[in-house]
Amino acid sequence: MANYDCCVRTNYFHVKNPDAFRNFMSHVYGSEDDIELWEETDNDGNLVFGFGTSGGISGLCDVNGDVDYNSYHLFIGGLQEHLCDSDAVIIMEVGHEKLRYVIGSATVVTTKHCEYLDICALATAKAADFLGDPQWATRCDY
């Protein structure tokens, strides 16, 4: 059995309160490594943030710093609270387990919505469209 190896990073996005967002992110933990938080300025000189990690994002630590392994949904909810209404966070993940599973995904988060996109499902749907066969399907893992 092989290990699943992945990395995660986001686009750059605007938040309502940078200090509150930094505090929130200090409670986010990764499955294998610390979360790196990046700050830049956009073309208008406004502060934007991005983050990433080697390994996945597991969720949030509680107020005592204890890891809660079922808190990914709390992490997403926290992002939604900090995000500006006119912006989106795109969490991109790529990973593999040997060559049996090669994964690419994006989770799109806005203040009101969150949707997971899988590259295999998107590519399969596009191939079905190209072939003119909405029932066409394939297997992408082994």
Image (cartoon, rainbow, N blue to C red):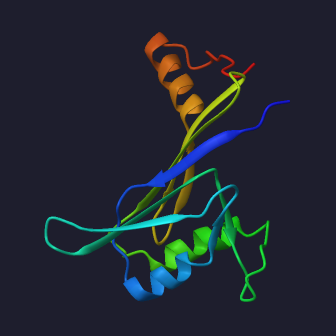
Residue found at the very far top of the displayed protein: 131
- The residue depicted at 63 percent of the width and 50 percent of the height is 55
Residue found at the very far left of the displayed protein: 44
Q: Nearer the viewer, residue 61 or 122?
A: 61
- The residue depicted at 50 percent of the width and 80 percent of the height is 81
Quadrant in the rendering for residue 14: bottom left
- The residue depicted at 63 percent of the width and 18 percent of the height is 135
Picture quarter with the N terminus: top right
Picture quarter with the C terminus: top right
Quadrant in the rendering for residue 97: top right
Q: Position of residue 56 (x, y in %)?
A: 64, 53
In this image, 52 relative to 136: left or right?
A: left
Residue found at the very far front of the displayed protein: 33
Quadrant in the rendering for residue 26: bottom right
Residue 30 lies, with reference to residue 65, above or below; the image says above
- The residue depicted at 48 percent of the width and 13 percent of the height is 132
Q: Position of residue 19 (x, y in %)?
A: 42, 87
Q: Position of residue 110 (x, y in %)?
A: 45, 66
Q: Position of residue 65 (x, y in %)?
A: 73, 82
Residue 102 lies, with reference to residue 52, above or below; the image says above
Residue 85 lies, with reference to residue 129, above or below; the image says below
| Number of on-image labels | 0
Q: Nearer the viewer, residue 77 or 5?
A: 5
Would residue 19 be visible to someone looking at this image? yes
Would residue 91 be visible to someone looking at this image? no
Residue found at the very far right of the displayed protein: 1
